Image (spheres, grey):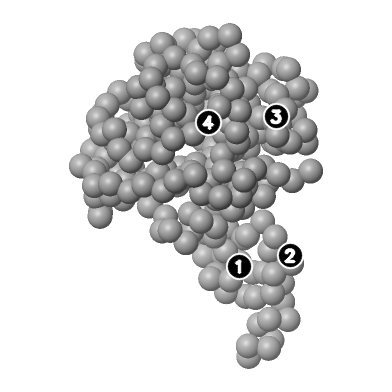
Amino acid sequence: SDDQCCDKACSSHQCASGFQLLPDAGSIQGSDDATCCQPAPWLFLDARSITSSSGSDVSEWKDSSGRSNNFAVASDCGTPKLGIASWNSALPVVRFGISGQTCLKSEVAHSVPTSATFVGVVSWRGDGGNWEPIAAVSHDRYWTVRMVYNTRELNMHVRNEQVPRVGVELSKPYVFAARVDGTGKKSYMWIYDIEEGVWTGKQVYNTEGIPSGGKEVITLARASAKTWEWAQMDMAIFSMWDKFLDDAAVTHFVMQYAAIAQRE
């Protein structure tokens, strides 16, 4: 019965394939996927999982999704360091672009999805090189989450499309949510101001879509090969789904990540 269902905490529920329990499942009553579960990320990088001390080199960043999509410093990358978020002394961040280009790359090449969702917590400390990618796959062929050239406007860059894009400021923490709907041929960029607790902006535009058939390495904080395209930023979380998440799911993750970013 419904009464029997709601006497159980979600922590005892088994989610369907492709889903995982909500982080606070133990405090939620229910026994169904809609109440207890959320879409499981294909990739989840969380700086809180790095056990080194602040100031140490970050030579690898292990995937916390359970899929072993790990990242490491490649031969053409400068090495980022572990730091502490400027807005929360309890939150570790991976600090990119301390004295020039730094990056981490996926340890193996992955099939490029034609639909994807990217959500993360970042703060820009300064202006890096041209374009300033958060994450990139190839150059003007598949996808990149990056600034538009010589601006502070973050763009869901598909092929060579310069929209959608939303402006940001330096030294402020944000949750970004970038998406590509390969079926509906739409690209999205949403940005949430963590300290102000408001949406900085939401844009959606038509897109040609991500081409199919690719297999590429993912690069964080720099272009795939162009070493002069790099970001000067702190990253607390970077996550990716190899599918398009709807507005409700994205809003859920944005608010969840904002709460993590402020947690003492």
Q: Say whether disc 2 or disc 4 marks the residue closer to the N-terminus.
A: 2
Measured in 3D between alpha carbons, the distance from the residue under mark 3 to the one under mark 4, in whole angstroms, is 14 Å
Q: Earlier in the sequence, mark 1 or mark 3?
A: 1
As helix, strand or loop, the secondary structure at mark 3 comes to: loop
Residue in the picture at 63% in, 88% down: 2
**Picture coordinates of residue 210, whole percent (x, y):** 27, 40
Q: Are marks 3 and 4 in contact (CB under 8 Å)?
A: no
* Residue of label 4: 169
Give the SS element for disc 1.
Answer: helix
Is residue 145 at all visible to an observer of this figure? no
In front: label 2 or label 3: 3
Residue located at (25% from left, 55% from top): 184
Q: Amino acid at mark 4?
A: Glu
Give residue 70's quadrant in the image: top right
Q: Residues within 10 Å of mark 2 (few under 14, many from 20)?
A: some
Q: Nearer the viewer, residue 151 or 54?
A: 151
Which residue position is annotated with label 2?
26
Front label number (1 vs 3): 3
Q: Quadrant of residue 233?
A: top right
Q: What residue is pinned by disc 1?
A: 36
Marks 2,3: beta carbons within 8 A: no
The quadrant of the image that shows the N terminus is bottom right
Vertical comparison of 100 with 183: above or below: above
Q: Residue 48, can we see it?
A: yes
> Which of pointers 1 and 4 indicates the residue nearer the eye?
4
Give me the C-alpha separation between circle 1 and circle 4: 36 Å
Front residue of 184/12: it is 184
Residue nearer the viewer, 7 or 110? 7
Q: Earlier in the sequence, mark 1 or mark 4?
A: 1
Is 141 on the left or on the right of 47, as rendered?
Answer: left
